[in-house]
Amino acid sequence: MKYTRTLLLAVLLVLLAACTQPKPSTVGSDAGIEKRIEQLLSRMTLAEKIGQMNQVSAGGEVSNYAEALRNGQIGSILNEVDPVKINEFQRICVEESRLGIPLLVGRDVIHGFHTIFPIPLGLAATFDPALVEQGARIAAVEATGQGVRWTFSPMLDIARDPRWGRMAEGSGEDVYLDARMAEAMVRGYQGEALDANALAACIKHFVGYGAAEGGRDYNSTFLTERQLRNVYLPPFEAAVKAGALTLMTSFNDNDGVPSTGNTFILKDVLRDEWGFDGLVVTDWNSMGEMIPHGFGTDRKDVACKAVNAGVDMDMMTFGFISHLEELVASGQVKESAIDEAVRRILRVKLLLGLFEHPYVDVDAGQAVQYAESHLDAARRTAEESAILLKNDGILPLKAGQVGTILVTGPMADAPHDQLGTWSFDGEKAHTVTPLQALKERFPGQVNYVPYGYSRERRTRFDDIVAAARRADVVLVFLGEEAILSGEAHCLADLNLIGTQSELLVALKAAGKPVVATVMAGRPLTIERDLPNCRAMLYAFHPGTMGGPALVNLLFGDVNPSGKTPVTFLRTVGQVPMYYSHTMTGRPYNNETLLADIEPEAGQTSLGNTSYYLDYGARPLFPFGYGLSYTTFDYSDIALDKEAYPQDGTIRLTFSLANTGAYDGTEVVQVYIRDLVGSITRPVKELKYFERVPLKAGEKRTLEVQIPVSELAFFGLDGVTKVEPGGFQLWVAGDSASGQPVSFQVL
Ligand code: NOJ
């Protein structure tokens, strides 16, 4: 009896110890750093603490900010990239403010700093986290070289509506792909050691922002907790686990609650469940915008709501700096909440080593911008990100046999547009367009006839068509300007704008082979254009080295390997259409009829199933799709078991053969379906991908391991776990191919 009691006591003590154990720091803090934080905090006045929570946008002369910096009223600035000015800001903070706390300097370094990589949607199309990580590292080296230590990237918003302009800034529609890209970018920006080249990542926009109603930016979202937990939150959780130092709240209100005042997401999930101890910043004035949202009466009210919900830093509302002192005095905000926020801010500054090294070496920093190796990585990334959507065999072009090349189209020589959205620091002068790259490679063979977007330029058609008749091949570069995607740049019509489609028709009629390349910030509805070209490469906005990359692809120096990171639609009316939808009770199942359904087919011919009378039920290209100059064949697909325990690992083996005439890389994709759940489950979910290079004729046996725990989801009982039962698994080159194999989870 006595023995049992002692045992019980021991168990209780162990449990108590486990509960009181401090959670491990997600951002990698340690006892030394925590001690320094407490020492500093104990010396700070309330006003100085609140000053740390204030972020302002720089502009104009350093003297405009000198007094506020000296008085400790600014914790962070954004939008200053002049290293001399940044050093001066730091000098004032470090040498002239009472406590010498350095400044955190932020900038939107979204897909490169000076050397611009493809837009994030294009990065996702590479399905190559290692390469994306390298790109983020390069962005960090360049940005930190000029004194920027914090980027507002990566954007992890799942986007399933291409009307939303900010689809360009994220990894597209898929949870798994987004999460892998998130980890890669966080690792790349911050580096392995948080050294002088570490650029703090800011995962954004928390959360659900990409689900804006109607695809109109800033719009409301109505995501249930289940959708949040199964789709929108996992990439953020992955990035937190990867050590992201900071997080930004989103503009949208979800189910009536603006994110910047949402205690459930900012405290219950982020802090309590995930243990995030990095800093939370608002989006630009998103605190102030809770007033027009109708979620607060005035700036004081929204400042109160934001800080109590768990926001640490105010970007450009000036709500904290103006009102937190009175809110503490009146007891509406506890000083302990302010202390917590300041701890998180100081933690990031200490982790970045800003106290030890507040200044940047201006000359050394200058020397690394546009380094040869950076340009090379940008080119390789652009090569991997381009997706071959159509090829009747005309590609790759044979360099020795092309004769005269007509180059035309609005994106042929548009250096600024080719950089894409959020490329503040990219420069036209350093950007190599397809026209430049072609001229360099084929001196004397290129005939360029410019073309603009607008209808007035239509007269140009005659010149272009005449030139096409004289050419041996027509390379037309189509798409959309950078300004047509990105923040607040949404579209209701996703066809190629202006007269580009008509241009293609006219070029085709000229009778020479037409190869189209599209540069855009989103998947455009290009169905009507496909018949008018013999091949189409889809490059998104490919960045600084887009020109050489595309020329290498068109002429076969590099074999295309990019895959669609988002479903390509036939028409905008199909929005939202994404591969991992759940199944209706009346699924669309007539595969032959659905391929070529015509408006006049009428509903009855297909029964009462879920489809459009005029456009059927299929997209133009499924998620994960992309052609190569070679072909790949999957065979001998087998699982090591028929049934797996919950803590088991699925071992999949298969053979992959390159069955064509070119060396190439296949993006192997593994999808699963959970057949029956406590809630309806997606028809397919990506659970693994890998780029596999194969020589022409080469065949390899591959093994993929997927932990059964990867099959967990937030079910009816509100618990994230794997539910036992039947599953299917596909291994294929896109989300619509392959034959399933079955297995059970016990
Ligand atoms: C607003 C955007 O929503 C956000 O993504 C960006 O980081 C901030 N502005 C700062 O420029």
Image (cartoon, grey):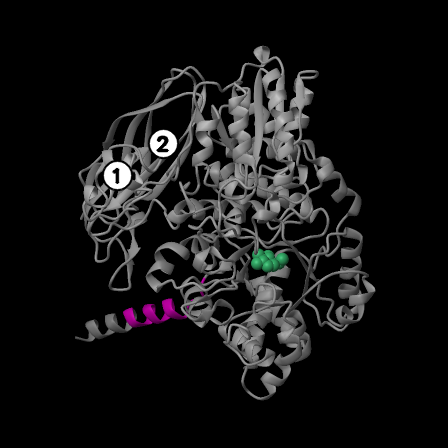
The residues colored magenta run 11-23
Depicted 317 relative to depicted 708: above or below: below
Circle on res. 57 = none
* Magenta span: chief secondary structure: helix
Mark 1 vs ligand 1: CB under 8 Å? no
Tell which residue pokes out farthest to the top in this image.
401
Q: Where in the image, quadrant-wise, is ligand 1 located?
A: bottom right
Q: Which mark lies nearer to you, 1 or 2?
A: 2
Residue 428 in percent (x, y) is at: 71, 39
Q: Amino acid at mark 1?
A: Leu
Q: Secondary structure at mark 2?
A: loop
Residue 237 counted in the magenta span = no
Residue under the image location 62 percent in, 85 percent down: 326
Residue under the image location 43 percent in, 38 percent down: 564
Q: Which residue is mark 2?
A: 733
| Residue 376 visible | no
Within 10 Å of the Cα at label 1, are there few (<14), some (14-19), or many (20+) other Cα atoms?
Answer: many
Image quadrant assignment for residue 302: bottom right
Residue 27 in percent (x, y) is at: 52, 57
User: 428 or 586: nearer the eye?
Assistant: 586
Residue 139 in percent (x, y) is at: 63, 44
